Amino acid sequence: MGDEEMYDIVIIGAGIAGLTASIYARRAGKKVLIVEASSYGGQIINSPNIENFPSYDNVSGIDLMRKTYRQAERLGVEFVFNKVLKVEKKETTFLIVTDDGDFEANAVILASGTQNRRIGLEHESEFMSRGVSYCATCDGALYKDKVVAVYGGGYTAVSGACYLADICQHVYLIHRRNKLRAVGMPVERLKDFKNVETQLSSTIVKLNGEDKLESITLATPEGEKTLPVDALFVTIGREPNVNFIEGLEKDDDGYIVAGEDCKTNIPGLFVAGDIRTKKLRQLVTAASDGAVAATEALEYLQGA
Ligand code: NAP
């Protein structure tokens, strides 16, 4: 190997899982690096109201993650904001190749989360930032007093629709099934808005427009229907993105196979958070994974 800087543990991803793992590893006195492709915080930074994280009645994702990031920083966790291109298992160590330098580690924790699922329609990429968005809280303000649509029936879609209802003239909430997936508080809140129109049992089949999105065509039980909209917020879930390491066991949906001990099929490589095969993907379960993965990595290092 070359002159790569050596770490006890390199963590890929600075969301709640990666940051929690780093806090546990640093408190055990290890030299820890987090490599993150974008900004710290992970997907939760786009949630304006989190009401199910213990100790907070209500907290914004960005506030929560800023605190967690600063906690890790104060403990001496190192950060680089690079994209990981490859993770390679060498004889006893791992080589982490990024778009701006390489690093070496005795153990690696993958906590790189998931990416937005696309609908897969023609013009979807072309209209991105020109009417098509994947984040209501990031881009909603651009469509003040306009007509917008939200696609999906989960918590992200429902809380996105509530957020947009405060800003926009009219919000269509479009979901493929006859029942929303989200239940409870956000769905109750949705009922308070008179400018939200829910369109169930419908799928979006066309994105129409010249240079930007102008309307969407739905397949509904009554036939095709075109709605003029200024923006479409696609919030139909997320997908794992781990194409930078070979030989890793994944399930049919691409999630990394690991049990509650967060151990993958590659010794010394652990996985934490939403990219692990698991039933409940929440902040608390991702944080829990971070603690477990770090503890397992520490045990692995002791034996190494
Ligand atoms: P999600 O719960 O997986 O919901 C995705 C929605 O998109 C579902 O309604 C699904 O339909 C629909 N969908 C999936 N693929 C589709 C496709 N190809 N075409 C059309 N529709 C499609 O995703 P999420 O809402 O982003 O939430 C992700 C996780 O984060 C969940 O565990 C959620 O509980 C959590 N979360 C929590 C909060 C909170 O405040 N507590 C906030 C945001 C997210 P079906 O219903 O038919 O499957």
Image (tube, rainbow, N blue to C red):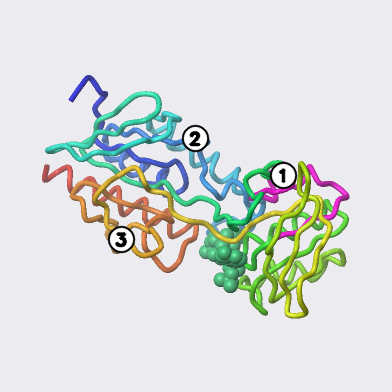
Q: Position of residue 218 (x, y in %)?
A: 73, 67
N-term mark: 2 or 1: 2
Q: Residue at x 28, y 50 (%)?
A: 270
Q: Position of residue 170 (x, y in %)?
A: 85, 59
| Residue that label 1 marks | 139
Magenta highlight range:
130-150
Residue 135: in magenta span: yes
The residue positioned 40% from the left and 55% from the top of the image is: 275
For the point 73% across and 72% down, the residue is: 188
Real-space Cα separation, disc 2 to disc 1, in angstroms: 26 Å
Real-space Cα separation, disc 2 to disc 3, in angstroms:
31 Å
Residue 18 left/right relative to 47: left
Q: Give the numbered dot on residue 289.
A: none
Asked if the residues shown at circle 2 and circle 1 are in contact, with their CB atoms under 8 angstroms apart, the answer is: no
Q: Secondary structure at mark 2?
A: helix
- Residue 169 pos. (x, y %): 88, 55
Answer left or right for 295 relative to 174: left
Specify the quadrant that holds the N terminus: top left
Counting residues from the start of the chain, the first of labels 2 and 3 encountered is 2
What residue did someone put label 2 on?
70
The residue type indicated by label 1 comes to Asp
Q: Considering the numbered disc 3 on the image, is that residue within a helix, a strand or a loop?
A: loop
Question: Where does the image place residue 304, in percent across and percent down from the top left?
Answer: 12, 42
For marks 3 and 1, give the CA distance: 34 Å
Look at mark 3 in the image and give the residue it sits on: 257
